[in-house]
Image (cartoon, grey):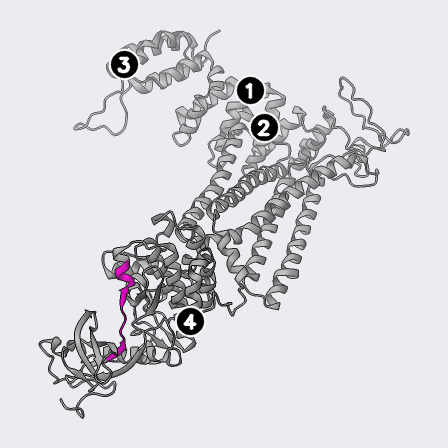
Amino acid sequence: MNEADRPTDLAPAHSGDPIPADEDTILGSTLHDTYKVVRFLAEGGMGRVYEAHHTRISTKRFAIKVLHGELKHSLEVRMRFRREAEAAASVTHPNVIGVHDFGYAPDGRPYLVCDYLDGIELGTMLVNERPIATSLAITIGRQLCRALDAAHDCGVIHRDLKPANVFLVGSPHEPDVRVLDFGLSRVLEVAESSVTQTGMVMGTPAYMSPEQAKGERADHRVDVYGVGAVLYACLTGKPPYDEETPHQTVLAVMSREPVRPCAIVPAIAPELEVVVQRAMARNLDERYANMKELDAALARFEEATAKRQGARLTSQNEPPASVPPRAVSAAEIAAEIDEARGVRQRAVAWMFLAALLLTFGTLSAAFGVFAMVAPSRPLLPSELLLATVAVLGSVLTPGILFLRWLRRSYWNNSARMVSFVAAVRAPVLAGVFIYGLAALVGRALDATGPHLASSAPAPNASGWIGWAPFFFGLGLLSAMGAFLRTRLLGPSQSLVRRILAGPIVIGLVIVASGALMAFGYQMSGRERPRLASAKEEPAPAKPPAKTKSTAAPTDRRSTEPTSEPATTAATVDTSNPEEPEPIEGAPQTEIDKAVAGGVQDLMALRVKYPKDPKVLKPLALQLGKEPERTSEFLRVLDVLYAEAPKEAEDKALQKELMRAALTLATSQRAIELMRVRMGSTGADMLFDIVLENQEFRAKARAALETTEVQRNLSPALKIAYDLYFATSCAARVDLLPQAIRDGDERSIMVLTFVSAKPKTGCTKRKPCHAQCGKEAPEMEKAIKKIRDRIGEKGVAAP
């Protein structure tokens, strides 16, 4: 091929051009009458590299990169080869390899004339020494920052930074860096060309950035990631991602963080790990904004070896660090690096404090809400346990999911952990501080309340358990306000954001907190007694005993007798700081009137006589007839049985209680009432549920097996219980003498069930057999003797 036929631009090569059988025919040839090729140096994926001498200046040596013959027909490869020449030639910097010429060999293959470098490739050094010294890694990293900063100033992005494209010349301990291979580079001014279209995945998988792996458009921060990846390899001796296949590597780059450098080499300083991980941040906005910022961060670690490095840096006439152009100062970068040491321990401490606030705050808030809903209804022990477990579960479940998310997204990245701690510190501090401050102020108000003037409101701010959800709400509001303020401010200093994060957010939190506390104060007045002031007359001593009386209580501040009717005089005077004591015995006339008036009148009467069984019993009976008010029925019944245990024998109340026990929504509370309040009667009812209702059998049996119920089993119930839960028919036979002596209709029912053949589900081919068919004759004799003893009514004879 003569010079006229040789391709001179980026047009496709002629398809008929022969591919040479032996590419080493380049050896010994002279290219462009200027470069005498003298020896082969290396081979890569795109071509071969040769050493050449200048034909007119024999002491001048070059490295010539020649494209592989089979690739010369690819327009994309030829464009990349040409682009490398143009990009590298446009950047003039001591740390960027110099490109001097571009041309075509006689067979049509393009070649590139570069500086001849005498040294070692960083990739080769990492194979021989893995990892390399930290000081050497920092030196290499800073020179890469300067080289790429110069490239970015020229509008060139490298996009394929890796150890194989970093060459070290000079002293092995203090080498000079040369950046090679701008073949994947992109010129910023032609970003919209087809060569750089979105969707193309370009780069080396183990060192490419997440946006490259996804085929997204990459800006200059892709090189920030590249320097971080090279530093990662220098410090650990391993690439950031080292999967079995390139495809798996690309997927790993897109989906997860690389292993922490300190997990591979524990000797790496946590502060340096933060710099590397910040440079390799998956989110573009979390990376250093440019090479100057990364260089400034690395400069801190070179200060320790400044004396050793000073002469070389001075000879290069390079500044020790450049000031970042954006609003992130060197001091801010230094502060972030200093935060790295112990960042995970601090994160655990803050999360532990937040967990304490959420757990105990939610627990106290839940019990406070219950106290407001049912002020006179104490929680049963089992209800207390269930409520505690439910609250802990509601906190632990999202907590565990949060920890899994934190471990996957943040834990392995020290830079992100520094950001995480900075983000959670203010909300946790605000929540804990305001919650604790509210409780302390409440205590102070309670302490000063008795000394206030009689006209001043008595706050009872901490003594009322209903305050718990309001205090917890204050803490949450403060935490959310601090979180919003942190998010709105961020790195931005815009006036709009500062206004939003300042007066607006703080004002909203104050208004919401004030409304919450006002509502709490209003609620507390309904549920609490008012505190007496120091200037009030002391209340008269409570008489040792009270008799039933229809007389209304007199006003303690007046010596005048009252002529008001009882119902009027009994109304609480809200102007009196002291609530009148409740009268225990209600007059029968009032009871009859309230019963005739219905549930609402009985509820009003109960306010005056909260523990009078004569009021509670008719109220419970009327509430029991309204299924939608079963929960209220159970609360009233609980107080009634506590004040008058003999009322547990009332059949009408037992009927309504059994209905509640066989209703899914109220079953557990009704069964607990049988277990705790009703003694032997409750045990009988529980056993009836076990015998007759399969749906609630397990709950009733669990209550029956508790120690307090076992102590209340009557002899008749005890033998029926033992017969029912006996483990074998032989064991039941051993219990027959006791059944004959103590058993009743329930023992007969159990023995009949196990000794008789089933009446359903039997066929000639599949006959049914009694559970205890062999022992059936003995059981039938025992049944007859029990019937003879208890008589026709099924109850034991006296």
Mark 2–mark 4 contact, CB under 8 Å? no
Q: Amino acid at mark 2?
A: Leu
Q: Earlier in the sequence, mark 2 or mark 1?
A: 2
Residue at 18% across / 88% down in the picture? 6
Q: Amino acid at mark 3?
A: Ala
Kind of element beneath mark 3: helix
Q: Is residue 520 left or right of residue 350?
A: right
Residue type pointed to by label 4 = Asp
Label 1 Cα neighbours within 10 Å, binned few <14 / some 14-19 / many ≥20: few
Q: Residue at the left extreme?
A: 21
Residue ID for mark 3: 776
Proximity of marks 1 and 3: CB atoms separated by less than 8 Å = no
How far is mark 4 from mark 1, CA to CA?
92 Å
On screen, residue 770 versus residue 510, left or right, reads left
- Residue 31 location, quadrant: bottom left
Q: Give the Cα separation between the discs numbered 2 and 1.
A: 13 Å
In the rendered view, does 291 fall on the left or right side of 115?
right
Q: Secondary structure at mark 2?
A: helix
Q: Nearer the viewer, residue 672 or 660?
A: 672
Under circle 1, the secondary element is helix
Nearest the camera: 731 or 65?
Answer: 65
**Viewer-proximal residue, 135 or 787?**
135
Q: Which residue is mark 2?
A: 637
Write down the region rendered in magenta.
112-125
Image coordinates for residue 245, horizontal then vertical, percent: 23, 59
- Location of residue 291 with respect to 416 vertically, above or below: below
**In the rendered image, which residue does mark 4 sit on?**
149
Q: Which mark is residue 330?
A: none
For disc 4, the neighbor class at 10 Å (few under 14, some 14 to 19, many from 20) is many
